[in-house]
Image (cartoon, helix red, strand yellow):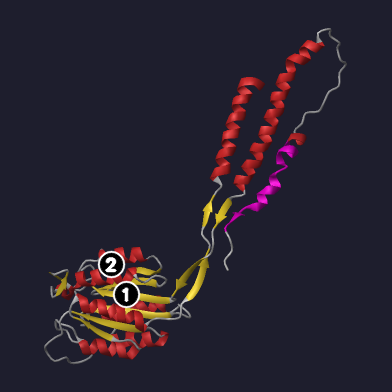
Amino acid sequence: MGKIDMIHFQWWWMIFALPLPVIVFYSLKPRTISFAGIKVPFYDVVANATAGQHRIQRSALALSTIAWIILLLACMRPQWVGEPVSLPLSGRDLMLAVDLSDSMNERDMQVGGRRVNRLQAVQTIAGDFIQQRQGDRLGLILFGSQAYLQSPLTLDRRTVHTLLNEAVIGMAGPRTAIGNAIALAVKRLKNRQGQDKVLILLTDGENTAGNISPEQAVQAAKTIGLKVYTIGIGATSSSAISGFFSSRSGVDERSLQQIANATGGRYFQARDTRELADIYSLIDQLETVEEEIHSLRPFKELYFWPGSLALLLWCLLFWMRRRWIA
């Protein structure tokens, strides 16, 4: 059973300033000087003439006291606190590594009935995937001849989505450094403790650049428990594949399968956007973890209401002083 709505004072200790005007008044009060009185025959007339002004002064004093109390109420920073709201957190650390090499410019994918290049297809489907990652910390790596961290791990899905959409083929170089991309993900995730670590690598699968080999990067990924899910974008190569990586155009499926299997992940082949969407759905199922429920109590600041009222009272007092008291 959740707590009911309530008013909470963030700076409640400001109430101790309540007697401050009295302390200042008596501390700065001038020393009284006694003198002999003078009896005048028209004292009653003077007393009656000043009686109304005394009443106004007493009213001004009472109004000043009320204004001071209301001002202190504003300074105590009142807040309306609502009922607790449960926030599910899946606890995943998820990095996306997107290939921006020249081979991603191949127009062999379709989105909405029109032919697009591989990067445009990834941006369309990966954008939807990012929007569904509520509670996960997302990061974005863009790689070509070199790998660059475009966004560190964050809960801000909108920013990651925007950065992905702003990516341009060739901005990281014309070639493909898959080993560097995996190594950069390892570097960013190695200090994350007690979390599931996942890297989704989207590429045409042919390592042609970089100073870190895929084999070295895979060993580092295994050390920190990073699962790599590899997604081959586009048509597979029709020629035989030799070695760990080849340098031909087309998807090097065997190499991507080796990376995924070595780290406990899986390899997927995306020949069109429908397959790519199905792959993301399957990854959601594979990486589901027990959710932790975190509660958050929404609050609304209320200090401007008593603050505004105190300001109005002070304006009224200023007007009274100019009109009657002064």
The image quarter in which residue 217 lies:
bottom left
Q: Label 1 amino acid? A: Leu
Where disc 2 sits, the SS reads helix
Q: Quadrant of residue 90?
A: bottom left
Residue 268 seen in the figure: yes
- Reading the image, the residue beneath label 2 is 164
Amino acid carrying mark 2 in the image: Leu
Residue 301 circle label: none
Q: Is residue 100 magenta?
A: no
The span shown in magenta is 5-24
The answer to if 14 sits in the magenta stretch is yes
Marks 2 and 1, the one that precedes in the sequence: 1
Residue visible at 16% across and 76% down in the picture? 103
Decide which of 5, 309 is in the foreground and name it.
Answer: 5
Work out which quarter of the rendered image holds the C terminus and state it: top right
Q: Quadrant of residue 82?
A: bottom right
Q: Position of residue 135 (x, y in %)?
A: 42, 71
Mark 2–mark 1 contact, CB under 8 Å? yes
Compared across the picture, whether 305 is left or right of 277 comes to: right
Q: Is residue 250 left or right of residue 146?
A: left
Which one is in front, 143 or 259?
259
Closer-to-camera residue (295/137):
295
Tell me the tag on residue 96. Answer: 1
